[in-house]
Image (tube, helix red, strand yellow):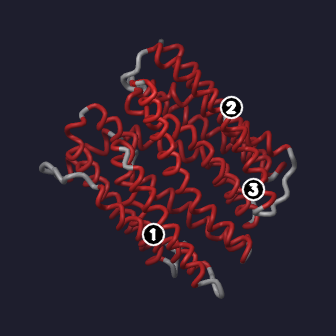
Amino acid sequence: MRDSRKTLYRSKLISLEAVNFVLKPLHISIVSIIIIRQYNSELWGEFILFLLGIEMLLTFVNWGQKPFLIREFSRVPSLIGISWSKAFFSRIILLMFSLVLISISPFISGYKIIFSVWFISRCLTSFIEPIIQFNRKYKWSILTEVFSLGVSLGLLYLFSNDLDLGGLLLVFALSSLVKMLLIVPLVPSWKLPAMSLQKAMLALSISFPFFALSVSGLIQTKGDLYMVTALLDKVDIAKYQIIIGFLVLGQTISSIVLGPFQKNIYRFKENEIKGLKTSYLKIGWISTSILSLGLFLVLKLIYQFEFPILYLLLFVAYLMPMYFYLIESQFLIKNGFERKVLYYTIMAAIIDVVLCIALIPLFELTGALYSGILSRIILARLIVFSYKKMK
């Protein structure tokens, strides 16, 4: 009876985290459907350049805070408030520096205020995400995301007669601002000890390996999208961003399943890791097959994009490698080998970019998928090999 309750509880956590994670990329996907069907792919392709800019700046400001704080919270749960406050203070400095860069950037001329509001809202919301995951406050997070999506849909309806790039940026800026305001109550008690610029720099240096992992991970997961943005036209950029958006969502499922156990994985023994990995791979094959078929049908029936049946197999090949190495990567980090994981992730990111440069001119969007698949297989092989060697 006790085991059944435990299983039911864990299943509930997985389901809530799944909904929480899915809603974020789903928000963008729903808006993309409306823009492409009601307006045109060029508008969405133009918007993607700003979206990628937000993601890169957000990765810089976060400075690896989420995985770093999850580890710190797991090690010393009684000091969550202090750990979070130190991380927040140090990253506010990076936020201010980023705003200076935005103010002098010539690439977003005419949209700097809207872009800044969007960026600040995203940053402040992301600062609270480690608290959500560790304390499992998924219900509140889900409600805020649903409300944010409702704001986006309402604004799109208001602008339906005349929507341009500025209007689309405003939609995302205001919906992100609303979400940020609603999620503030989840901030822990403020227990900030005496801080200084020197201490802030020390805090950033300690979490640097996690920042480097975030950067290399961003390039490794979306490097092919960056290269498509550089090498192909706006219509192809729009198509590939939608594909990658769903594929990243599919990859998120692997983290969702593992999420409720992530803070416990640092305490797992070897036999428990093996049992978790077996179940994890089974879930991976089932979920990946279903998601790949669903993505293929969504692209064909909803977005009205025509892709060959080969893409169905490519989607499976793109998604599955993460299930082979995610647990091992967490175990390596647990044992202080985050620099090794970083090195492998950087290698995979470089391979992805190089392959994209070679294959996109030859195969266009298909070449980008080939590049992403090969780099992920290489990364999985390197991490699993390192894990086995460590044992």
**Above/below status of 99 relative to 384:** below
Q: Residues at badges 3 and 1 in contact (C-beta under 8 Å)? A: no
Q: Residues at badges 2 and 3 in contact (C-beta under 8 Å)? A: no
Position in image of residue 305 (x %, y %)? 81, 60
Tell me the CA gap for discs 1 and 2: 37 Å
**Above/below status of 161 relative to 65:** below
The furthest residue to the front = 1
| Secondary structure of the residue carrying numbered label 2 | helix
Q: Residue at x 28, y 31 (%)?
A: 75
Tell me the CA gap for discs 2 and 3: 20 Å
Position in image of residue 101 (x %, y %)? 42, 67
Q: Residue at x 28, y 53 (%)?
A: 88
Label 1 vs 2, first from the N-terminus: 1
Label 3 vs 1, first from the N-terminus: 1
Q: Nearer the viewer, residue 194 or 31?
A: 31
Q: Which mark is residue 298?
A: 3
Q: Nearer the viewer, residue 258 or 169?
A: 258
Tell me the CA gap for discs 3 and 1: 28 Å
In front: label 3 or label 1: 3
Q: Amino acid at mark 2?
A: Trp
Position in image of residue 295 (x %, y %)? 73, 50
Q: Residues within 10 Å of mark 3 (few under 14, many from 20)?
A: some
| Secondary structure of the residue carrying numbered label 1 | helix
Q: Amino acid at mark 3?
A: Val
Q: Nearer the viewer, residue 289 or 177?
A: 289
* Residue hosting label 1: 118
Label 2 vs 3, first from the N-terminus: 2
Tell me the quarter of the image containing the N terminus.
Answer: top left
* Residue hosting label 2: 285
